[in-house]
Amino acid sequence: AAHAQHAGGSSGLVEAGREPMVAAIQGAFRDVDVEVKVRPDSFYRATHCQLRFSSEDALGLPPELLGLSCEVQVCSLLAQVWNDVEHGLVYVGAGEASPEEQAALHAIGRLTEAGDALVKVLLTLEGRAEQ
């Protein structure tokens, strides 16, 4: 998965950075559908932005890309860790995680939540956290 960092610096590191990142995407493209996805049965959390490239957004794109769409998924850096592990086990793997894998995913999910909170504290101490 590709990772991008907002021009503001630390926006992509913490959950609070999702909204400003989505706002930046909406400011850069004219046609964006936004869906916040949080699965209550898991630790999955991301905002999906479906972009459609119009002639106004062309920015030197090859003509064959006009009218096409792509999806940008915005999440914190640590949420991406959980999302990647879960995707590898469930979607790419056997389709269903074993009880042991589910327990490990749950533990990783708790660690990513705690990590998000700690990163936010550190950024706040440095005066760089999203308000």
Image (cartoon, rainbow, N blue to C red):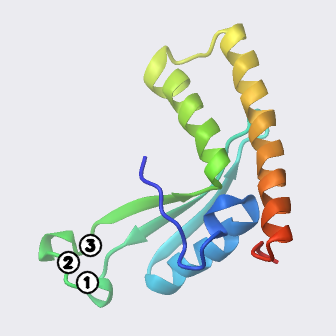
| Residue drawn at the location 59% of the way across and 29% of the way down | 86
- Disc 2 and disc 3: Cα gap in Å? 11 Å
Q: Nearer the observer, disc 3 or disc 1?
A: 1
Mark 3 or mark 2, which is nearer the start of the sequence? 2
* Residue type (three-letter) at the residue carrying disc 3: Gly
Residue 65, image x and y in percent? 20, 70
The answer to whether marks 2 and 1 mark residues whose Cβ atoms lie closer than 8 Å is: yes
Frontmost residue, 25 versus 125: 125
Mark 1 or mark 3, which is nearer the start of the sequence? 1
Q: Is 65 positioned to the left or the right of 69 in the image?
A: left
Residue 58, image x and y in percent? 25, 83
| Residue drawn at the location 55% of the way across and 73% of the way down | 6
Judging from the image, what secondary structure is the residue with disc 2 in? loop
| Residue drawn at the location 44% of the way across and 25% of the way down | 92
Q: Is 73 positioned to the left or the right of 55 in the image?
A: right
Crowdedness of circle 2 by 10 Å Cα count: few (<14), some, many (20+)? few
Residue 98, image x and y in percent? 65, 9
* Residue type (three-letter) at the residue carrying disc 2: Leu
Can you identify the residue that label 2 sits on?
A: 61
| Residue drawn at the location 60% of the way across and 73% of the way down | 9
Crowdedness of circle 3 by 10 Å Cα count: few (<14), some, many (20+)? few
Judging from the image, what secondary structure is the residue with disc 1 in? loop
Can you identify the residue that label 3 sits on?
A: 67
* Label disc, if present, on residue 34 of the rendered structure: none
Quadrant that contains the C terminus: bottom right
Can you identify the residue that label 1 sits on?
A: 58
Please identify the quarter of the rendering in which residue 22 is found. Answer: bottom right
Crowdedness of circle 1 by 10 Å Cα count: few (<14), some, many (20+)? some
- Disc 3 and disc 1: Cα gap in Å? 10 Å
